[in-house]
Amino acid sequence: MRIIQWKAAMALALVVMSLFSLPAAGQSAYKKLVWSDEFSKAGLPDSTKWGYDKGRGCPQNCGWGNHELQYYTWNRSENARVENGNLIIEARKEKFEDCNYTSARLVTRNKGDWKYGRMEIRAKLPAGTGMWPAIWMLPTQWKYGGWPTSGEIDIMENVGYWPDTVIGTVHTDAYNGMKGTQKTKGVQRKDISSAFHVYAIEWNADSIAFFVDNEKYHVFANDKSGVAGWPFDQDFHLLLNIAVGGDWGGKFGVNDAIFPQQMQVDYVRVYQ
């Protein structure tokens, strides 16, 4: 009888322990911090963690394929700097090379590349018609071919004419914006340009889940159709940028009276 009681007690204890080991609602299962930037040192962004995509993006002034209007500068504090504990990416109305606007596009390529994990960015967004800020990921090696075959993960996008909406999207060969089949969903926040919010994904072999302030609002599941539907078994890197205008951001033009505009980033953290 005592043995039976002891076994019953042990079984109950194991059940209780297993419950405590499960992640609570709103709590991530990804615990190990593997990469971060807290932006604690003023000046240019840390060159050991960040590089730049530069210029116009392709030869015929195509604006990174989206007819964007900005020139992406590098090592230029007017467009990218750390101050007061935040990374500042600033879009400006100014003549530079053959463009009338400048901005910056920071990348972790070959300095921070990951397969799977939780990517978490706390940021405050710019505001105004013509703004197109993004926090996103691209493949580092492009193993399966050019865009969109090797995939794209848009952790957060916003366009200025939708001032209260942020959007999470996945692009692949089967599901992409050129075909109108992209897997996308938005969530509303009334203060995205006046307050910081935490934008995140949790990515594993089976799905990519999208979060704002720990609210899961979108999940893209691996449909097991192969690379056309799921190229997300390779290393990806992070990108942070503000585009000006473009096919989506500039749908209703650009309001020149709003400049300069900033995306402020409190931190970037990657957990696995």
Image: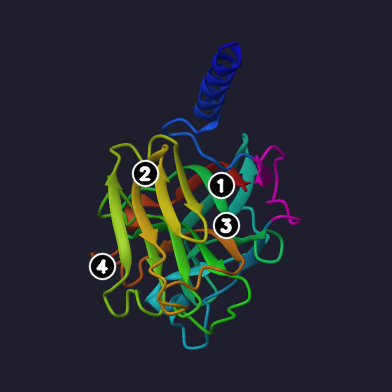
* Residues drawn in magenta: 32-49
Q: In this view, does 233 lie above or below 83?
A: below
Tell me what residue is drawn at x 27 percent, y 65 percent.
253
Secondary structure mainly formed by the magenta segment: loop
Report the Cα–Cα distance between label 1 and label 2.
27 Å
Q: Is mark 2 on a helix, strand or loop?
A: strand
- Are the residues flagged by discs 2 and 4 in contact, CB closer than 8 Å? no
Mark 4 vs mark 3: which is more N-terminal?
3
- Of discs 4 and 3, which sits in the foreground? 3
The residue lying toward the viewer, choosing from 107 and 77, is: 107
Mark 3 vs mark 1: which is more N-terminal?
1
Tell me what residue is drawn at x 70 percent, y 66 percent.
110
Q: What element carries label 1?
A: strand
Report the Cα–Cα distance between label 2 and label 3.
17 Å
For residue 116, which numbered disc appears in the image?
A: 3
Report the Cα–Cα distance between label 1 and label 4.
25 Å
For residue 88, which numbered disc appears in the image?
A: 1
Residue for badge 2: 216
Mark 2 vs mark 4: which is more N-terminal?
2
